[in-house]
Amino acid sequence: MFTKALKDIENTDFFVHWGNGTSHRLLTETDGMGFTVCHTKVNKGSESVLEYRNHLEACYCIAGQGEIEDMKGNVHKISEGVIYVLDKHDKHFLRADEEQDLILVSVFNPPLTGTEKHSLSADGSSSY
């Protein structure tokens, strides 16, 4: 059994500035749990085009509001208490509302090494 706190992660390589926010990688591959858990902040007013080619991801919103849009134009609102699931390595737009940051608990399978970073290009897309 073990514990970790957000403040313990902030001075390590597992606190990642991913382009339009931050991610505290609380559980990673080295923890041996078979999945990753992150506390993810999406900056208010931001939009990112993201894709996880090697991981499935589920995100549970604990604060803020935003939306996720698939590449076919289907938009799903995100607010506290809503989970969204990228079960097919879905390329997507992630947007946070203008008023406040979007805070998510993100779970990845298989686990992240913990230091992966998005590289948002001029068109805003990134994948890993």
Image: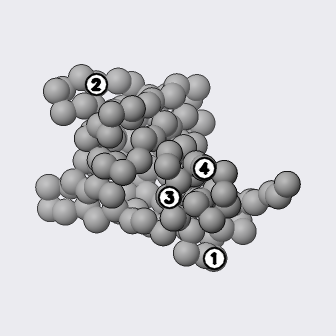
Residue at x-position 28% and y-position 65%: 119
Judge the density around disc 2: few (<14), some (14-19), many (≥20) Cα neighbours within 10 Å: some
The spot of residue 41 in percent (x, y) is: 50, 51
Q: Is residue 86 left or right of residue 82?
A: left
Query: Mark 3 vs mark 1: which is more N-terminal?
Result: 1
Q: Nearer the viewer, residue 121 or 27?
A: 27
Residue 62 appears in view: yes
The residue mark sitting in front, 4 or 3, is 4
Q: Is residue 49 above or below residue 17?
A: above
Q: Nearer the viewer, residue 1 or 12?
A: 1
Q: Nearer the viewer, residue 110 or 24?
A: 110
Q: Is residue 64 above or below residue 46?
A: above
Q: Label 4 to label 1, Cα distance in Å?
A: 24 Å
Tell me the kind of residue under disc 3.
Leu
Quadrant of the frame with the C terminus: bottom left
The residue mark sitting in front, 4 or 1, is 4
- Residue ID for mark 2: 75
For label 3, the SS is loop
Using the rendered view, name the quadrant where residue 20 is placed.
bottom left
Which disc is residue 34 wearing? 4
Q: Is residue 98 left or right of residue 13?
A: left
For label 2, the SS is strand
For label 4, the SS is loop
